[in-house]
Image (cartoon, helix red, strand yellow):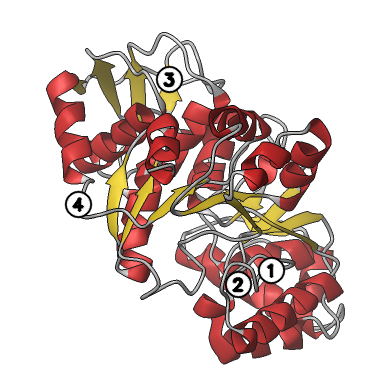
Amino acid sequence: MKLTAEEKEMLAGKRGNAAKKSMEILVALGEIFGAKRLVPVTSVQVSGVSYANLGDAGLEFLEEMAKDGRARVYTTLNPAGMDLENWRALGIPEDFAKKQKMVIDAFAKMGIQTTCTCTPYFVGNRPKKGSNISWGESSAVTFANSVLGAKTNKEGGPSALAAAITGRTAEYGLLLEENRQAQAVVELKSELKDETDFGALGYLIGKRLGNRVPLITGVKKASEDQLKSLSAALPTYGGPAIFHISGITPNKTGVPAEKITLGQADFEQAKKDMNDAGEVDFVLLGCPHCSIGEIEKIAALLNGKKVKKEFWICAARPVKKEADKKGFSKPIEEAGAKFACDTCHAVAPLKGRFRCVMTNSAKGCFYGRGSNGFKMQLRTMKECVEEALK
């Protein structure tokens, strides 16, 4: 790879130990993937934030980097393993909370915004079309590439942190226009009605096309929240970190010759595949984290009612504060539902606490099973709220 004078200085250790380690990570990645150079990034989102995933070795690495490492671009964090303020109310052990706070303190020392969310585009980290970024969370990466038109690979925690400290990333993969082009047309013969349909679409494309980039046709309209659901499901079930929807998404692409068709029977089977039998004892919305619009809908559905099951609404803390100001939080909390800011069921230490979880997220079904061994059921938001009230 060809490095600039400044990049060579960082690699040589002239800009500090953290910058040196960061450059070593980026150069190694670049050489592995055949990058010719590093390019500046405008924003970063760092994954690998939960202590449940990091452990003591990861915490030690972060504290070492925090000695002289400082973020050079706007950087936010992926969800932590707990709500950073109300962890006791959500049943998180005190010893876990202590270590999780040490993780967050290390990131804060590096000048990173400790907004722990998988939807950074809802809290100010919303890159412009065509900009190079370095994001780590799979649903956010796919949303940024596909819906916002920014350019990012799926970064690991160390490589995203390295990008934050250096302000650079290796130019390969989805930063290159030729790798963003559609490779197969997905023609829909069934109307997409709600977020579970968009989640099922991601499931089906991942299973049918693997990592090939889809150009989806036959979608009449799609809200940002529905595109969020598709962005979450697609990479979770084996698909690429970018998609195109004819007439809806911003990126230009050619029309490939290969085509697959998806009809109503395919969607029904996909939902059946993602559902387990069982008596629901936990209801969760917000995977990825809820938008303010989704919280408004939940508030309307819960207004004047009382939940009878454990019910979490996962959201970024700034979005929760906006909900407070707009009066959306009050009916939710009065109903007995709980906000879980900064975290989600995929990264919180919840194994053994619940048996069967209902959610409106196809991605949530995958990680609920894989991370905590839950049985999972996929339903619409309205059906999830109705279940919590039983």
Q: Which residue is mark 4?
A: 276
Q: Nearer the viewer, mark 4 or mark 3?
A: 4
- CA gap between label 1 and label 3 equals 32 Å
On-image quarter of the N terminus:
bottom right
Q: Which residue is mark 3?
A: 245
Which amino acid type corresponds to the residue marked 3 in the rendered image?
Ile
* Residue at 29 percent of width and 34 percent of height: 200
Q: Which mark is residue 158?
A: 2
Q: Would you say the residues marked 1 and 3 are in contact, meaning their CB atoms lie under 8 Å apart?
A: no
Residue 207 in picture, x, y percent from top left: 21, 42
Q: Secondary structure at mark 3?
A: strand
Q: Which residue is mark 1?
A: 162
Q: Secondary structure at mark 1?
A: helix
Binning the other alpha carbons within 10 Å of mark 4 as few (below 14), some (14 to 19) or many (20 upward) gives some
- CA gap between label 2 and label 1 equals 6 Å
- The answer, for residue 149, to whether it is visible in the render is no
* Residue at 54 percent of width and 23 percent of height: 251
Which amino acid type corresponds to the residue marked 2 in the rendered image?
Pro
Closer to the chain start, of discs 1 and 4, is 1
On-image quarter of the C terminus:
top left
